[in-house]
Amino acid sequence: MVENIHWLGHDCFRVEGTHTVYFDPWKLAADAPPADIVLVTHDHYDHFDMDDIRKISGPDTVIVGPKVVTEQVSGFETLTVAPGDTVEVKSARVTAVPAYNLTKFRSPGVPYHPKEAGYVGYILDMDGRTIYHAGDTDEIPEMRGIEVNVALLPVSGIYCMSGGEAAEACTVIKADVAVPMHYGFDIGSLDDAERMRRLCKIPVEVLEKEAR
């Protein structure tokens, strides 16, 4: 189920198929393969970097993101989404899923990723496979009922779910396989990914980080 899904570190993935799709491109190599579709979850620097988007984008690339992202993009085709939206992007179907914190706060009562900010995760439906990229989020009620082939879930804690919380999220997300992400840069480690694998009741694939 994870074939042609390349983990490039942190929350960044490249999915190859009918279209080349990037999630949250960041710290990419200068010769990274060009993108047909770029899906950006929110505007924090480690998820949205215009220099990286320029590396992989051409005249036919479509950049999808919440308003806080697309209003900062110029020179490329954009598609603005809000939580709950489903859009057709080329021949792929993309659904924006809420992504926010319930228990992670920068100061009392102030979450790192507030619900009202409109940040998103995505469900990508392409080539007969569905991939859920959760973005920066805690386990939230909107995860209940998500049914996908592959779930890409953060595990570092602090700003998003920990490995244990990601495993718990897999009790409400219906997925054939889960993949840990959001570790290995500043916060989170392979131990967090392995903790998710130990505790999760569905299969977990810990992907090797590939050259960006």
Image: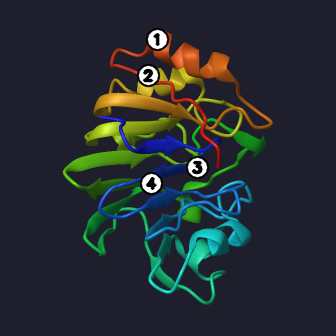
Element type where label 3 sits in the image: loop
**Element at label 2:** helix
Q: Which residue is mark 4?
A: 98
Residue drawn at point x = 50 percent, y = 59 percent:
22
Residue at the extreme front of the image, as rendered:
31
Q: Is disc 3 surrounded by few (<14), some (14 to 19) or many (20+) residues within 10 Å? A: many
First of labels 3, 1 by sequence position: 3
Residue 98 visible somewhere in the drawing: yes
Three-letter amino acid code at the position of disc 3: Cys
Indicate which label's residue lies in the foreground, 4 or 1: 1
Q: Residue at label 1?
A: 199
Q: In the picture, which quadrant includes the N terminus?
A: top left
56 left or right of 185 in image: left
Label 2 vs label 1, nearer the camera: 1
- In the figure, is residue 165 to the left or right of 49? left
Residue that mark 3 sits on: 12
Q: CB atoms at circles 2 and 1 under 8 Å apart?
A: yes
Estimate the spatial distance between the alpha carbons at disc 4 and disc 3, rounded to whole Å. Answer: 18 Å
Label 2 vs label 3: CA separation? 23 Å
**What residue is shown with label 2?**
168
In front here: 31 or 209? 31
**Quadrant housing residue 48:** bottom right
The disc labelled 2 sits on which kind of residue?
Glu
Of labels 3 and 1, the one closer to you: 3
Q: Give the image location of residue 137, x and y in percent.
A: 55, 43
